Image: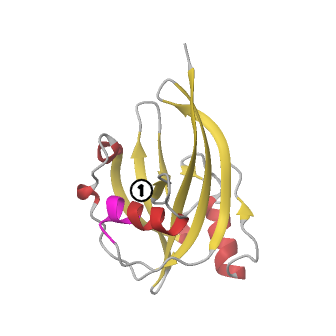
Amino acid sequence: METDLDFRECVRALILAQDPDPAVLLIHLVLPDRDFWITPGGGIAPGETHHQALRRELQEELGRDDLEIGPHIWNREGTYPWAGGTASEREFFYLVRAAKFVSDLSGNPVPGERELMAEARWWRVDELPAYSKDFAPARLGSLVADLLKNGPPARPVDTGF
């Protein structure tokens, strides 16, 4: 029998390098029933601000605590299957500009999470499909292309799920 899991608020970083070809850093999550690429980030702990949570997540997932968090650019909200039930999540994406770097996924202290992260990889923007269920959000490629063409939006854009 499926159970409903708690609603979760998350922060995510769209880490964008523009040296010389624009690229974004994504994490390959491998779950028992599917795998996909997602931006670094995770849940907001009680009492944390968005920036505090994102700094903690970047340290846990990438081994970096020195990245400058830029503007809030996107929102994503939805429900999806997770761990035999359904999870509902609201995500807040922040733009982080950085030179390309090598990520260190090995230091993640969250039990079971490190094992789900198969790799971190820089994807050239021209490699990203406009829409694909292999990415979260599915239209990541078109969102990044729009961001490069028009700059950060005045108000956060709803990415769809």
Give 152 or 146, whichever is nearer the viewer.
152
Residue 9, percent across and down? 58, 50
Residue 160, percent across and down? 71, 51
Which quadrant of the view contains residue 141? Answer: bottom right
Please determine whether, in this image, residue 95 is positioned above or below residue 40: below
Residue 36 lies left or right of residue 100; in this view the side is right
Please determine whether, in this image, residue 37 is positioned above or below residue 16: above
Query: Which element is circle 1 on?
Result: strand
> Residue at (68%, 78%) from the top-left corner?
152
Give 53 or 90, whichever is nearer the viewer.
53
> Residue at (56%, 78%) from the top-left corner?
70
Q: Residue furthest left?
A: 106
Residue 81, percent across and down? 56, 31
Residue 116 lies left or right of residue 43; in this view the side is left
Q: Residue furthest bottom?
A: 20
- Number of callouts: 1
> According to the image, label 1 marks what residue?
27
Which quadrant of the view contains residue 55? Answer: bottom left
Q: Residue furthest front?
A: 47
The secondary structure that most of the magenta stretch takes on is: helix
Magenta-highlighted residues: 58-64
Residue 69 lies left or right of residue 59; in this view the side is right
Which quadrant of the view contains residue 128? Answer: bottom right
Give 77 or 20, whichever is nearer the viewer.
77
Q: Quadrant of the N terminus?
A: top right
Residue 152 lies left or right of residue 12; in this view the side is right
Q: Residues within 10 Å of mark 1 (few under 14, many from 20)?
A: many
> Residue at (34%, 73%) from the top-left corner?
65
Q: Amino acid at mark 1?
A: Ile
Please determine whether, in this image, residue 5 is positioned above or below residue 119: above
